[in-house]
Amino acid sequence: MLNTHTLRTHRLFYGGGLNQVQVHDESQTPTALLSQFELAGSEHDMVLLSRLSDDRIVALDERGNLYLWPFRTGVKEAIEPVLALNLMPFKDASLQGSTLWLMAREQGERLSQRRLFRIDLDALQVAEYPPCEFDFVGGSMVALENGDFAFYQLSDKPGYPFRTHGLVRYAPLSGQVSLLPLTGKPAPQTISVRKTFFFQHRHGLALTANTESLTTIQGADGETAYQFELQLVDFHRQQVRWSRPVRALLPNQVADEYDCDELAEALDAIAGGDHRACHNDELQRFVECLTSATLSNDGERIWLGWQDGCVQCLSLQGELLSPLYQLQQVTRKGERTSLSPWHDQLNILDVKTEGQAPASSILILSMGDPEWATLWQVALPSVAPGFLCQGAEPQPALCQRTGFALQLPEPLLGTPVPSGQLDIPCRDTEEQGDRLTSLTQLNALMPTLGTYFERHTQAGHLFFAFVATQPGGDKVQSEKQFFPAVAAGNDQDREQLAQLIEHFSRWPCASRLMGQAGAPVLADAVLSLIDRPDYLPLLARYFNAIGQQESVQRYHLNRTLPALREIHAGTSELAAFNQQVPPPWNNLNHTVVSTCDYDDD
């Protein structure tokens, strides 16, 4: 594998999707797919994916299924696990050369216990160490030079005096555990939708808020602003490298106008020394305004992102390297407005540095909840330290919508992986134009797919995943998400779905194929078109083409057909539909017991 080859992973979360590993060649424009590997039996989150020096790939999921295989180009194939460790819960992993270290609990052990596992990836030998009683934040494991490991730890005792954090140092050979307390107080809530602990595993650095440092600042206009210190924790040096305030925020930059008074009252009390738990919610809301902290690709700069759409750059020494930038977008009316008018979550996914010092940085951003976030790009100049002052007015910076195209070679384009999943690239799953581009590509593939299933008679499943390549993790949508979003567009958009159903209805092999998790093929595309009477003849052809396995009947008899009959009750179109379809689709008395989506068939 070359340096331009990158590993990507994604999984359909609905219906027991398996983890997919793709190898991309980023030296080509657009990026090219070289191979795709399906990890058999891996239905849980991936915790490790890496290349080894000898062109092997290693992957591990959170249940301890370990996969190890040689890289091959031009294939789509299933990879079986070489080890099944049955870990629950999994806590952390660290890859050092051809040795994999895991911190987890084996099934059956006490909940408070976890132990270190050492796996020799060459000999596939597993060594277990005695149980450890200390707890730590998952994903914070750092290998130190002398063979020890460092972990970040939060106290789980309630109350301000006990809200502490520190680094745990663990020596596997001796079993010795030592705790180094860190200065400051972490955020009051350890479980939250938003991050307050930003960990950079590659460099062994973490950024976190010191809530003990909350202070007020009185502005010239009489308004009160609030600030907290940000700490840089160095795992290798075992210390807080620096702690300093980075930005003062007004209440309306933190909360909606209806909540500003309550927020200000709580923050004033905390700044005055009142640390009662009744103020914790507002304190948590305040520190969660910082939604992202990302190292540049050269490891020399830290970019901070805030919920009001502002970003700023710091050096590793905590010096300001840029002014505060207010990210903006151009609306459909041609007006410039904030990229985050509703205090959404801003994540900085990737930072690339260009030019000599003072260099400029290209930021790839996602704005909004990860499920529906939009992708943006902005180029921002840095400056030499010492020329900036904290508290200056933000400078506007215009962002552009962006996305990442992926090209597939012909042999891979129309070939599903062994489970039946076929990935369709989509530049941006939140943009209707990009959805339609992907659907057009899929429609063009349907004749090739039909031929594939006619030749491969043992292949009995087909379902689609629409994948948007993104830094920091690919975004994937199932048919259940993608097809209704397309149908919500105009008549031309729905016509693309209709063409897809028409293609499938002509396949001679359609009656033996199943979709994901026992559902019918294209079930959600069909369900998305039942409200239009002009599509009923098309749906009749679909029902004539598909099989009548029990799970197929269960889906359509309990979902599709009751809704279709209710919408078109008493119409001539419904009468014609019932005449065109065979039993059981036209039999009102035929029923199949309905089950939950998550029940086993």
Image (cartoon, rainbow, N blue to C red):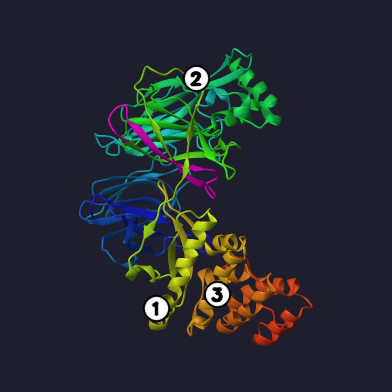
| Amino acid type at image mark 2 | Ala
Q: Is residue 268 above or below residue 28?
A: above
Q: Which residue is mark 1?
A: 452
**Nearest the eye: 85 or 214:** 214
Residue depicted at 67% across the width and 27% down the height: 260
Distance between the alpha carbons at the discs numbered 3 and 1: 17 Å
Of the two numbered discs 3 and 1 in the rendering, the one whose residue sits closer to the viewer = 3
- Residue located beneath label 3 in the image: 501
Q: Is residue 328 above or below residue 274?
A: below
Q: Residue furthest front?
A: 334
User: Magenta segment, which residues?
Assistant: 354-377
Q: Residues within 10 Å of mark 2 (few under 14, many from 20)?
A: few
* Residue 355 relative to residue 534: left or right: left
Q: Which of the two discs, 3 and 2, labels the residue nearer the N terminus?
A: 2
Quarter-wise, where is residue 25 in the image? bottom left
Residue 226 in the figure: left or right of residue 425: right
Q: Residue 491 placed where, x, y %?
A: 62, 66
Q: Which residue is mark 2?
A: 392
For the residue labelled by badge 2, is the local secondary structure a helix, a strand or a loop? loop
Q: Position of residue 37 (x, y in %)?
A: 35, 63
